[in-house]
Amino acid sequence: GQPHIAHRAGRLHVEQLPLDALAREHGTPLFVYSTQWMLDALAAYQRGFEGRDALICYAMKANSSLGVLRVFAEAGCGFDIVSGGELDRALAAGADPSKVIFSGVGKTRAEMRKALDAGIACFNVESEAELEVLNAVAIEQDRRARISIRINPNVDPKTHPYISTGLKGNKFGVAHDRALAAYRHAASLPGLEVVGIDCHIGSQITEVSPYLDALERVLDLVETIEQAGIALHHLDFGGGLGIDYNHDTPPAADALWKQLLARLDARGFGRRKLIVEPGRSLVGNAGVCVTEVLYTKPGEDKNFCVVDAAMNDLPRPAMYQAFHQIVPVSERTGGASTTYDVVGPICESGDWIGRDRTLNVAEGELLAVLSAGAYCMAMASNYNTRGRAAEVLVHGDRATLIRRRESLEDQLRTERFD
Ligand code: LLP
C-alpha cells in the first residue's frame, strides 16, 4: 500500500494531509501522527497471534497522549502502565481496566491502592520487597492482587546500554536464581494470587536471537516453578521490538512471533495465555516532528542549522546519541546542499537533533524529524521555559489537534512566590 508518511508532489504528507499546511495552521514545533500507521503496526501483532490466546498491552510510556491512547483502546488493546498517572490517563482514554498490567520497580502504596480499586489484570512485581508491600496493601483493602514476577533473564539485547534492561547489572526484575524462592514466597502470601511470569529485556531490539534466548530461559523457569506446584496462567514477554530509524532492519512483529511461537509450541506452551508490552514498535514510525529553520550559521569547523525544536521536545539524540532522519518538508529544486549540525535553541551543546546532515534548506523553511512517535513528546520537558509542542493526529484526510501548544500560563500554574 501507500506509505503513510511520504513526499507526494514534493510535499511531505502524513496520510492525505500535507505537513506544510498543518504547520501553518498549528505552528511549530508540531508533532503529527498517522493513525493508520499505528493500526497497521498493531495489525502485525494481531496477525502474529492469530488463533492464540494473546493480549497486546500497549506500553503507553512510549506515547501517552490521550488521543493516541484512544486509538489503541478503541482497537481493543490492553495497556502496560508504570505509574498511577498512567493508569488515570489510560482510564480517561477508555481503557478496559481488566486489560491493564502494571510494571515498574518503584510502585508506591498509593499507586497500588488505586490500581487495586480499578481492578487491573496484573501487577508485574519487580522485587521480593514489593511482594510484601503489595500483599499488605491488598489485605488492607480486603482484596487479592493478581501478580506476575518479572524475571531478569540475563540476556544481552544488543542495544544501547541505557535501554537494555535484562542484564544482571540492571535494576530490573528478580534474578533468575532467586525466581523460584520468590514465587514460593508469593504463593504463601494471602493477599496475592500468582497468575503469571514476565520479562522485558530492553528496547530498540533489532534481532530475534535475544528474544529466543530470553524465551528459553523463561520457559525453563516456568517448568521449575510449576513443578513446585505453582501454576502460571500467562507468560508475558515484554516489549522491546525496534523500529527503523536509520536503515535498521528489525523483524516485523508477525515474523518475530512466528519464530517465538514455534519455540513455544515445540516446548508445549503454545496454548498458554500470552501477553506482550510493545511501545515503540506501535507508535515510533507513526510520528514526525515538524520544525522551522530559524537560522543557518556557518561555523569554523561546522555549519549549524538552528531550528525551533530542541532537546526538550526531542530528547533522544541528547540522551542516547539517537539518530533520527531529518528531511525537508517541501523538496526544493534550486539551491545547494550543505552539511549541517541541526541544533535547537537551548543553551547546551548537547542540544542537537542531528549531526552532519546534508540538507538543502533556507531560513523560514520546514524540516521534519522522522520516527518521532515514541519517546519524544512523552519525554518532553519545559527546560528553558519552553512550552511543550502541539500534537495533531491524522486519519485519512482528517486532522485532530489532540494537544494544544502549552502556554506560559500552563507552565506557571503550579508556582508561587511571596
Ligand atoms: N515493558 C517494560 C517493562 C518496559 O520497561 C518497556 C520500556 C516496555 C515494555 C516497552 O518497550 P518498547 O516496546 O517501547 O521498546 N526512552 C527510551 C526507551 C525506554 C524504554 C523503557 N522501557 C528511548 O527513547 O529509546
Image (spheres, grey):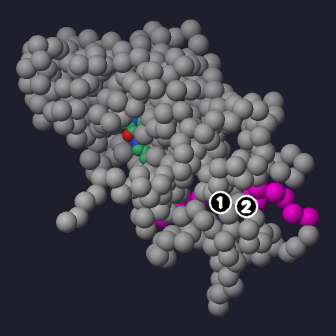
Range drawn in magenta: 317-333
Height in image: 138 above or below 9?
above
* 179 or 395: nearer the viewer: 395
Q: Does the stretch in magenta take in 329? A: yes
- Quadrant of the picture in which ligand 1 is shown: top left
* Crowdedness near tag 2: few (<14), some (14–19) or many (≥20) residues, C-alpha within 10 Å: many
Q: Where does the image place residue 84, in percent across and percent down from the top left?
A: 29, 34
Image quadrant in which you'd find residue 269 = top left
Q: Using the image as rendered, state which of residue 395 and residue 186 is in the foreground.
A: 395
- Residue drawn 46% across the image and 38% down it: 64
Residue under circle 1? 291
Q: Is residue 155 magenta?
A: no
Work out whether 66 lies above or below 375. Answer: above
Distance in Å between CA atoms under marks 2 and 1: 6 Å
Residue 300 appears at what percent x and percent y? 65, 91
The percent coordinates of residue 414 (x first, y second) are 30, 53
- Residue underneath mark 2: 366
Three-letter code, disc 2: Leu
Q: Quadrant of the N terminus?
A: top right
Which quadrant of the view contains residue 259?
Answer: top right
Residue occupying the point 63% across, 73% down: 306
Task: Report the residue at 78% width, 69% height from top.
Answer: 361
Q: Are marks 2 and 1 in contact (CB under 8 Å)?
A: yes
- Residue drawn where x is 47% and y is 62% of the image: 386
Whichever of labels 2 and 1 marks the residue nearer the N terminus, that label is 1
- Disc 1 marks which amino acid? Thr
Query: Helix or strand or loop: what does disc 2 sit on?
Result: strand
Q: Is residue 174 visible?
A: no
